[in-house]
Image (spheres, rainbow, N blue to C red):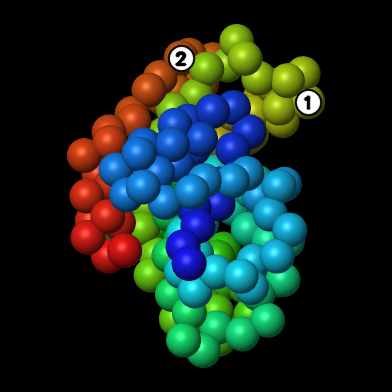
Amino acid sequence: MKIIIYGSQYGTTKQYAEELSRKTGINLKSYEDVKDINLYNTVIYVGALYAGGVLGMKRTLAKMSQCQGKKLIIATVGLADPIDTENTDSIKKSIKRQLPNDLYENAHIFHLRGGIDYSRLSFKHKTMMGLLYKKAVRLPEEKKTAEVKAMIETYNKKVDFIDFDNLTAIVNDI
């Protein structure tokens, strides 16, 4: 049995998960609604990148008792361009910190580019992004990662980088 589980705060990750479900016919659930992850032999986790982690992934996948014979696909959704290897290396390090080693070593990891609409952010997230922005613009140019540059470029704007064609590699892997 297969399942697509998603962790989305403002909707772009959910859009990717819904499209992936439509393309594959696999049932879809929010990470908050998953009761027993061990019922599934293939788990596709589509998660938004927030504060150095993947939303809901650690809590959800910690319930996975065995990874032997199971397939785990993780797709992250963030603002920075996944073509930049510096960015994807940073994301992989974050994922590795969130997962037991056996899960991480067997996971198929993909990266998707999402979007942001500052007008929809909660007060807490607007404040956090404002503080990050102020810190980011003061960094010397050589210390600005792709993720930091993307945050600076998109600060206080509405941007949408969603491209459902990027789901093809995930569909093929499933």
Residue 132 spot, x, y in % from top left: 64, 34
Q: Determine the residue positioned at 22% across, 50% down.
A: 168
Q: In this view, does 147 lie above or below 138?
A: below
Q: Mark 2 to mark 1: distance in Å?
A: 18 Å
Residue 67 spot, x, y in % from top left: 55, 83
Q: Hey, what amino acid is under mark 2?
A: Lys
Element at label 2: strand
Which residue is the extreme one toward the top?
A: 119
Residue 83 spot, x, y in % from top left: 26, 50
The answer to whether residue 53 of the structure is visible from this angle is no
Q: Residue 143 carries which label?
A: none
Quadrant of the frame with the C terminus? bottom left
Q: Name the residue under label 2.
A: 158
Q: In front here: 41 or 95?
A: 41
Q: Residues within 10 Å of mark 1 (few under 14, many from 20)?
A: few
Q: Name the residue under label 1.
A: 124
Q: Determine the residue positioned at 48% across, 79% down.
A: 70
Q: In this view, does 73 lie above or below 68?
A: above
